[in-house]
Amino acid sequence: MKDSSKNDFAIAIHGKVLRGAWTDENDQVKLFSAMLHDEAVTVAQVRVPDGTNEITQAEAILNATEIPDGKTVLLTMDAAHAQDETARIIGENPRADYAVTVKGNQPSVQREAFRKILPLLSGTPHDIMADDRRGRIKKWSCWITDAAGISFPHASQCAFIRREIFEKSGDRISKEHALVITSRNAGKMTAHAMNRHVRHHWGIENKIHYVRDTAYQEDNSHAWQGEGPQALASLRNELLGRDLRRQVEDGVKRVTGMSGIPVSLCESRDVEPLVQHEIKIATGEDQRRHGLDLRNRHRPL
């Protein structure tokens, strides 16, 4: 979560369609969420107005995030949000920066970024990350340079990330590339930080949205009126956050013999000011009485 400062948060923003919820105008309900990278905790969520899409909601999600005083935030986004207006909104906030993937929806920006980074690709990557779990080797190589000459609001640096997957034998299975633009300068965003943040961005899909779809069967919910879909999604997010905290507590107890998380561990994360309060859940006993306990994962909400 932290980058160059203990007062800095990395947050992924991403939209999600509720496939079972349809409005009177025959539109599907869409939500736009913000998740802390490392903690995998949803800290803000807004409903996308019917008839529009998530790329219009950058200012709404930034306001809903409520960055605590004295803190800064890096918002990571996929290529759908490589929009001039989105970059301006985030870049004009003195406590916010963006890191956004650039693809064919911004062809001129994509060409400019690639031309800028191309001379570096024959040299050694500025950062390499590797993961050899699950029987395969995954490798992320990152090159980064300044964004001079790139016509995109508040662009400070651009990066090229090559993602490769190998068999244990060394045979390459796949190779992908990503171009990324950030408003953060080199003093605050190194190649290692860029590599890590882009990799962690997809935790919002894998750790939050996928779990809501499978464990909580969110797409089977037909709620659509008013704030119903958002309220139910907020409840699922709250339960996921409590489940995560319980897992951490259990891990600390197994390792240290302590019955809870040390106060220092919680305080060092500075997470509490960001935790959403859209829905208040009382005690664990109340949750179980109403069938909302996480152990009842077969119950769709």
Image (cartoon, rainbow, N blue to C red):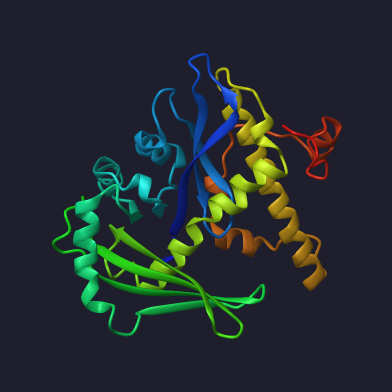
Residue under the point 43% across and 62% down: 198
| Count of marks overlaid on the render | 0
| Residue 21 in the figure: left or right of residue 77 | right
| Residue 226 in the figure: left or right of residue 121 | right
Q: Viewer-proximal residue, 86 or 113?
A: 113
Quarter of the image for residue 157 reads: bottom left
**Residue farthest toward the top in the current orientation of the protein:** 24
Question: In the figure, 246 relative to 216: above or below?
Answer: below
Can you see residue 6?
no
Q: Viewer-proximal residue, 61 or 249?
A: 61
Quarter of the image where the C terminus is located: top right
Estimate the x, y position of residue 11 in percent, counting from the top left. 46, 52
Residue under the point 20% across and 64% down: 147
Can you see residue 57?
yes
Residue under the point 60% across and 85% down: 169
| Residue 110 in the figure: left or right of residue 180 | left
| Residue 140 in the figure: left or right of residue 209 | left
Estimate the x, y position of residue 90 in percent, counting from the top left. 31, 46
Estimate the x, y position of residue 140 in percent, counting from the top left. 45, 73
Estimate the x, y position of residue 272 in percent, counting from the top left. 57, 49
Quarter of the image for residue 279 reads: top right
Quarter of the image for residue 249 reads: bottom right
Question: In the figure, 57 relative to 240: above or below?
Answer: above
Residue under the point 52% across and 53% down: 36
